[in-house]
Image (cartoon, grey):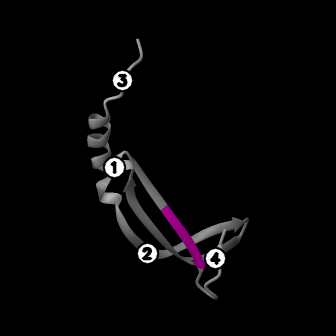
Amino acid sequence: MPHTPDVGGQRSAMKHLSFLTGRWKGEARMLRAPGEFVEMIQTEEAQYKLDGLLLVIEGIGRRQTDGATLL
């Protein structure tokens, strides 16, 4: 017999991550190669999708010196 997922329970469990939702911005430092650090401004946006069953976090880092997007 197929298992029926407890969607309500899953949605309720996802609410524990609600402190992550919103827009975040701050300074960051990334190691690109041995001894090669890049200073950047990191922006993140976290939001629920699929009626609260999925938490999507999208971010972008931009180099502090010229605003170029870092991959």
* Residue at the (39%, 49%) spot, across then down: 50
Q: Earlier in the sequence, mark 3 or mark 4?
A: 3
**Mark 1 or 2: the one toward you:** 1
Residue linked to disc 3: 4
The answer to whether marks 1 and 4 mark residues whose Cβ atoms lie closer than 8 Å is no
Residue linked to disc 2: 25
Q: Secondary structure at mark 3?
A: loop
Q: Earlier in the sequence, mark 4 or mark 2?
A: 2
* Residue at the (61%, 85%) spot, across then down: 67
| Front residue of this view, candidates 63 and 58 | 58
Image spot of residue 14 (x, y percent): 32, 45
> Left of 16 or right of it: where is 38?
right
Residue linked to disc 4: 69
Which residues are the magenta region?
A: 58-62
Q: How many marks?
A: 4
Quadrant of residue 46 within the rendered picture: bottom left
Q: Earlier in the sequence, mark 1 or mark 2?
A: 2
Q: CA distance from mark 3 to mark 4?
A: 43 Å
Vertically, is 39 above or below 15? below
Q: CA distance from mark 3 to mark 1?
A: 18 Å
Q: Amino acid at mark 4?
A: Thr
Q: Residues within 10 Å of mark 1 (few under 14, many from 20)?
A: few
